[in-house]
Image: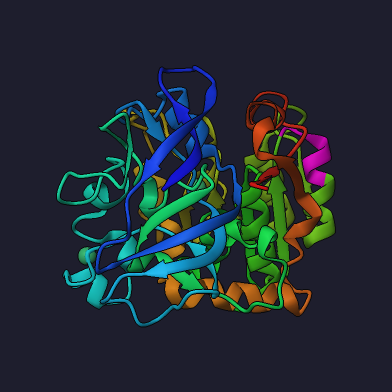
Amino acid sequence: MQATAAVVREAGGPFQLETVEVEDPRDDEVLVRIVAAGICHTDVAVRNQDVTLPLPMVLGHEGSGVVEAVGSGISHVAPGDHVVLSGDSCGHCRNCHGGRPSYCDDFVESNLTGLRRDGSSPLSQSGEPLRGRFVGQSSFATWSVAPGRSVIKVADDLPLELLGPLGCGLTTGVGTVLNALNPPAGSSIAVFGVGTVGLAAIMGARLSGCEKIIAVDPNASRLDIARDLGATHTIEPDAEDPVAAIRQITRGGADFSVECSGIPIAVRQAVDCLGRPGMCAQVGATPAGAEIAFSMDHIGFGRGIKGVVMGDSAAQTFVPYLAELYRSGRLPYDRFVQYYDFADINQAVHDSAVTGKVIKPILKMS
Ligand SMILES: [Zn+2]
Ligand SMILES: [Zn+2]
């Protein structure tokens, strides 16, 4: 069958809507009619080749849709089910068995090559394979053939077009706080960079009962949203030194921090602002090859930094949990979503990645 897909052919080039051929699902795969897909910073980073993955490729990794057909080995979803797509994993390495599939031994092969682990692709054009397995989905398309492990059933009475970002941005932000940091109630936490992931971290901090929740971002309008979603304090790093300000607000240093910008100076600040003890979760993608210096006099007093991928979450259980938090009003991320028609994908990228006026664009496929 055929689909319309947004193909990126060159670094910095446009997302071009093209017709592609879609294979039938294999035994362990699911054919999904994509209803909507969020645009995440990582999609744009690959398009710009700040993250150097092979092109051409169909990107998109916050898809939601309806199951059309399943392979013979699939039993957890059936045609007609509403689903969210998330990352793929092998299912049988130590970390997959341990409930931490984002640290799968085959993470790169499963998610970042744009191909199945056997090197094939479910998409092609004129008989030539086209990379169509990005993060288990390549959901900037009207149809996706996804591995079963990437396909997560969600309640069918929730707005399906809103749910795709649960599979990456929301999982990453909320999961980093709840799973990777797990702050006790009454803790203080600083969040550097309040795009989708940072705002999700702030909502996670509120869910955890954090007492002082400090948002750091140069964009004042984003700080307003952060305050709406639970930030108790906000800091514009261009106007004041965030480390000094956080130490003052927390009377000595934050118990936890989450760094979402990937900007090396902010990474250093997210560690320097910690109290004793304190832990920084590094989530933002730093520049390739970046090395950042820390004071060991500071680290030595019970402080640390750890990288976190996909919120240390098992998406098959965490995404439905987030969906129920949304339903109950405790994860109101719809406040920073803007919808676009699929055909306007380049405008949506511009509005989020270039001007920054939109935090979470979601493409509607029909
Ligand atoms: Zn993402
Ligand atoms: Zn694995």
Please name whichever residue, 148 or 258, is drawn nearer the observer in this view of the structure. Answer: 148
Majority secondary structure in the magenta region: helix
Q: Is residue 331 magenta?
A: no
Whether residue 227 can be seen here: yes
At 70% across and 27% down in the image, what residue appears? 347
- Where is residue 90? Give x, y as percent: 22, 64
Q: Is residue 15 above or below residue 261?
A: above
Q: Residue furthest front?
A: 1
- What residue is shown at x 44% (from left), y 78% (from top)? 77
Image check: 18 left or right of 327? left
Verify whether residue 220 appears in magenta: yes
Estimate the x, y position of residue 254 in percent, counting from the top left: 60, 58
Residue 263 visible here: no
Q: Which residues are magenta?
A: 218-223
Q: Quadrant of residue 304?
A: bottom left
Query: In front here: 118 or 1?
Result: 1
The percent position of residue 56, horizontal first and vertical second, equals: 35, 26
Residue 158, quarter of the rendered image: bottom right
Query: Left of 202 or right of it: where is 321?
Result: left
> Residue 312, position in %: x, y?
41, 65
